[in-house]
Image: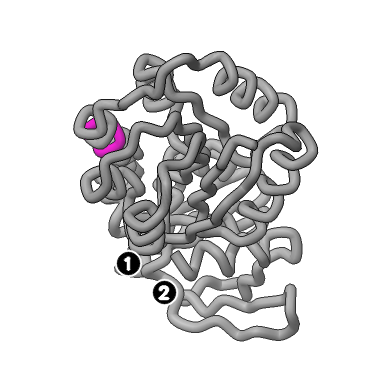
Amino acid sequence: MKRVLLIEDEHPAAKRLSKLITEIAPDLEIIQICDSIESSVSFLKNAAVPDLMFLDIQLGDGISFEIFKQVEISSPVIFTTAYDEYVFRAFELNSIDYLMKPIHKEELERSIEKFRKLNQPQKADWQFLSSLLQKENEAYKLRFLVSSGANLITVKTSEVTYFYSVERSTFLTSSQGKSYAVDFSLDKLEEMLSPKEFFRVNRQYIVSMNAIKKINVLSKSRMKIILEPLPTDEVFVSNARAHEFRIWLDK
């Protein structure tokens, strides 16, 4: 049996990945699931090096590359991540595979097959990957050019409290409570904004973490968000996004 370590801070994701691995490769034994940098380092310092690691990049207590600064590891690593494509290419150049969340069975099969073909453990240039990750974070949109009367002004993304759609138009609201039309749909904005700072709560709103002042829990899957500045409409988290929203809040 090959020994596998999972490092994943989202319980549903870890549970699903464990189930898929068991179905696809019953000869792989999941020896431990760690949910943080701290618990991963502690486990790796006191256990034999696993034959394979599945590693989420963004953990609750930081970027998982930190693990490799504290513990020397030669295990092949399959990253599970939602980061941009050029970072993925860097992983492949370093002979490390990746899986994009949500993980699909066919892609997992491909990654496991790649692991089986490895003859020697591969080491990655963690400093290089960390620098690329930093660049990827900086690649998100930093400002928006908007019209204010007869003038054009820029609004920093950090000053945006939420984006919302009305019919076929999209607007942003700044921390000063002013709203401006933007030339992007909410779907497009989701690709342009940092998922650490912004969340699509329903079809009409993308909200900033800093804009959330209060959350009224109406039921297990029904939440009302109080935003500041206060929008003209009441904002509810859709039932389909309620679980992901809770996870996002807790990161």
| x and y percentages locating residue 36 in the rendered image | 41, 60
Q: Are marks 1 and 2 in contact (CB under 8 Å)?
A: yes
| x and y percentages locating residue 54 in the rendered image | 52, 40
Q: Main secondary structure of the magenta part?
A: helix
**147 w.r.t. 39: above or below:** above
Look at 56% across and 59% down and name the residue there: 10
The reply to whether residue 182 is in sight is yes
> Magenta part of the protein: which range?
131-135
Q: Residue furthest right?
A: 23
Q: Which mark is residue 175?
A: 1
| x and y percentages locating residue 178 in the rendered image | 37, 63
Q: Which mark is residue 229?
A: 2
Q: What is the secondary structure assignment of the residue under circle 1? A: loop
Instruction: Report the front residue among 2 and 80.
Output: 2
Sequence order check, earlier mark of 1 and 2: 1
Look at 50% across and 35% down and name the residue there: 51
Instruction: Report the front residue among 150 and 108.
Output: 108
